[in-house]
Amino acid sequence: MTTQLQMIHLTEADFEKWERGVLSPAQTEAFLSHTASCAYCGDAWLAHMSRTPETLIEPPAYLADEIMQRVRQPDVVIAQKAHTTSKRMRLFLYSLKVGMALAASIYTIFAMDTAALGQIMNLFR
Ligand SMILES: [Zn+2]
């Protein structure tokens, strides 16, 4: 593994180093941040782990219940709602910008006098 993990994809050798636990803390951080942000390497790591299921540890039985309790708590629900709302707001603002640009373009075309339009049309001949 190199120090430029953000630039290149991980290899089978990197996954094997991870399994053997020989990565330094900095390499471990780079490994995890890369697999979290790169869909290609995330899929490759999952495929690697699927080929070696003996390395996977069974999750404790109580974990699913704990996760479900946690996602129903008010702070998590509020954070999720805020995220969804901000997504809608971004879509609304984007739509508004596109609408304004379209209106400005249409206005510009109709505001031109015939001489200016004739000059523009001559450019395309
Ligand atoms: Zn990658």
Image: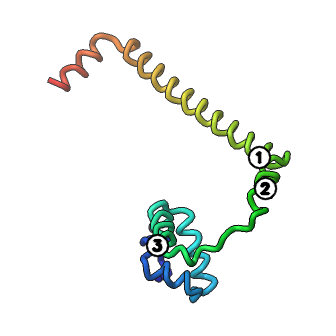
In the image, what residue occupies the spot 73% across and 44% down? 80
Q: Is residue 19 left or right of residue 57?
A: left
Label 2 crowd bin: few (<14), some (14–19), many (20+), radius 10 Å: few
Label 1 crowd bin: few (<14), some (14–19), many (20+), radius 10 Å: few
Residue 79's tag is 1
Between the C-alphas of marks 1 and 3, the distance is: 37 Å
Mark 1 or mark 2: which is in front?
2
Determine whether 112 is above or below 81 in the image.
Answer: above
Q: How many marks?
A: 3
In the image, what residue occupies the spot 57% across and 75% down? 30
In the image, what residue occupies the spot 55% across and 33% down? 94
Instruction: Name the amino acid, label 3.
Output: Arg
Residues marked 1 and 3 touching at CB (< 8 Å): no
Quick check: is the Cβ at mark 2 less than 8 Å away from ligand 1?
A: no
Residue farthest along the left direction in this orientation: 125
Instruction: Name the amino acid, label 1.
Output: Ala
Mark sitting earlier along the chain (1/3) = 3
Q: Secondary structure at mark 3?
A: helix
Residue 25: x and y in percent read 64, 83
Instruction: Name the amino acid, label 2.
Output: Asp
Mark 1 or mark 3: which is in front?
3
Depth check, front residue: 103 or 52: 52
> Residue at label 2?
65
Q: Is residue 23 left or right of residue 48?
A: right
